[in-house]
Image (cartoon, rainbow, N blue to C red):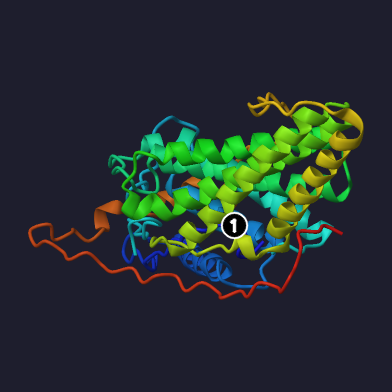
Amino acid sequence: MTHWFHRNPLKATAPVQFNYYGVATTPASSKICNDLRLSRTRLLELFTDLSCNPEMMKNATDLYFSLLQGFILSLDDSSQECKLRYIQNFKWTDTLQGHVPCITEDEAKDVHRSLKIAAGIFKHLKECHIPKLITPVEKGRDLEARLIDSYIIQCQAEAQEVTIARAIELKHNPGLIAALAYETANFYQKADQTLSSLDPTYAGKWRKYLNLKSCFYMAYAYCYHGQTLLASDKCGEAIRSLQESEKFFAKAEALCKEYGETKGPGTTAKPSGHLFFRKLGTLIKNTLEKCQRENGFIYFQKVPAEAPQLELKANYGLVEPVPFEFPALNAHWTPETLAAFDLTKRPKDDTAKPKPDEEVKPLKEPDIKPQKDSGCQIS
């Protein structure tokens, strides 16, 4: 789905060595530190590895988090935090303020499932971990509620795009496709509204993307709703629905250009260059001409001045975040291993001298070229 979905930059992070000389006092505790360093490095490598698949990512993530949780969870099932909870600081860039349409059925399932899992991870962070941070989240930063909510909604909307592409290919009922497109357009609109109070210098490009996708799927909704009306012999209303579809498609085209010209963080998607985008324009044109012909020969119905109100509700295909749980605590963590970390031997920080902020280098993302004239087909 390269160049179809907008993506903010991948978060980059400063290296963490987990070197606690003197604190880790046994071979077992030292091994955990070493395993943590290696597993974190491997996980970060996979972020930009084009050969990485969902299973590889999950295995690497589970291994790292199973080790990391020993610094967070109490091993005696008490409500107290682990004594190692604040031993390590992590530095990350901020996505806004800091530094493939043609796919196989299996790939489509991976995209669909991965987006639902991502939505579940964002939701889990929002509900379970962000409220426990000891430092309040700054406005406009990645862990702030507006950004987290937008990420959740965008993941749901993009997963539903895969559902819509599949429904179109299998020639499902136009009413179902119209309802799914309408729900998806509303998702994008809601995500855009969630970001509306952020500084446009940072969020403007992202909002253009969300807005153009909302208009694009409203065009889809009115187009397929028009087909449903025509099948019910409501040709005049069908014409008006297709005319509204034309308006939204034209607006989406204009927003594609504005989006491409807007400066801001993130990759630049190129939806208007995709066959999936262009095919909708052709479909709207052909369907509208068909309705107008049939109205001139058969129905002779008046075309309403107002567009039909879309009150569509999809009964199938709606996306919900997949509930996320951290993996079980790594077996290397035992009460004896935890006791082997002696915090009294930790070097004292020299707080008298202010330390300059360490620069975190941006994560170099792979440059994936879009396929020529590839349509959104799921075979």
Quarter placement of the C terminus = bottom right
Q: Is residue 52 above or below residue 211?
A: below
* One can see residue 180 in this view: no
Name the residue nearer the viewer: 23 or 41.
41
- Residue 324 lies in quadrant: top right
Q: Is residue 153 above or below residue 101?
A: above
Q: Position of residue 157 (x, y in %)?
A: 62, 43
Instruction: Name the residue that disc number 1 marks.
Output: 5
Query: Measured from the top left, where is residue 8 in percent x and y?
Result: 47, 58
Q: Residue at x 59, y 44 (%)?
A: 215
**With 303 as the anchor, is 326 left or right in this view?**
left
Circle 1: residue type: Phe
- Taking 321 as reference, is 300 left or right? right
Q: x%, y% of residue 240?
A: 71, 33
Residue at image coords 60%, 50% = 250
Kindly identify the residue that appears in the image at 16 percent across and 64 percent down: 355
Up-down: is 329 above or below 310?
Answer: below
